[in-house]
Image (cartoon, grey):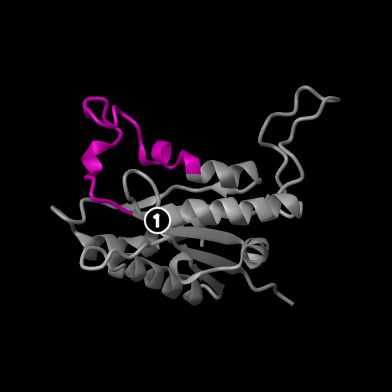
Amino acid sequence: MKKTKKVLLINTHLTYPNWTEGTLNNSFIQKAKDFFEAKDFEILETKIEEGYNPDEEVDKHLEADIVMLQTPVNWFGAPWIYKKYVDEVFNSGLFSKKFLSDDGRTREDATKQYGTGGHLQGKKFMISATWNAPAEAFDNPAQQLMQGKSTADLFLPITSNYRFCGVEIVADYNCFDIFKNQDIAKDLENFPKHLENVFGL
């Protein structure tokens, strides 16, 4: 009997009334749900703002073949509630030894690298993000702020947690310039193709 694949969709949006209500990030979550359901995935969901149980989130990660983070970028990172989520969920995964047993290094074998002790091999992780920043701000050394850095560089504090636990990181997807020069309809339209490509579905 064929095993049903599962995807965990994590929504980090934090509501600021009369400014950011979460409509855009919810739209990307819905696009992802439609895509994965059409591919016969079972959908697991967490909307951090609505609350969660860290131990249950560990179990969701263990069940999932794919984890997708949907996030607005607030001051060059995910909203603060996501950092709290990571600290609580990944600590639970560490203490229970479900995510990892150690950092990978041993005194007996000096060739083993830091960050190779994870138990989540075979899983994939992707970030989908919404930005005020324009696409032109990245991958260009002439840009004053990012100085040639990519979105993947900026996301290292997020992706490194997953890589540390053995998860494969795939290319992020970004909806840029959402307040000044957006093409949100096109970004939503192109999203399923990105999911198809990075996950080989």
Q: Is residue 139 magenta?
A: yes
Q: Is residue 168 left or right of residue 101?
A: left
Give coordinates of residue 144: x percent, y percent.
Answer: 22, 27
Give coordinates of residue 109: x percent, y percent.
Answer: 82, 25
Count of all numbered marks drawn on residues in the image: 1
Name the residue at 68% across, 31% down. Answer: 114
Q: Is residue 194 magenta?
A: no
Q: Quadrant of the N terminus?
A: bottom right
Seen from the viewer's position, the closer of residues 2 and 92 is: 92
Q: Is residue 57 left or right of residue 97?
A: left
Question: Vertically, is 135 above or below 126?
Answer: above
Name the residue at 26% across, 30% down. Answer: 140
Question: Vertically, is 160 above or below 122?
Answer: above
Q: Is residue 142 left or right of residue 109?
A: left
- State the residue position of label 1: 128
Badge 1 amino acid: Ser
Q: Secondary structure at mark 1?
A: strand
Q: Is residue 100 left or right of residue 36?
A: right
The magenta span reads 130-157
- Using a 10 Å C-alpha cutoff, classify the residue at mark 1 as few (fewer than 14 neighbours), some (14 to 19) or many (20 or more): many
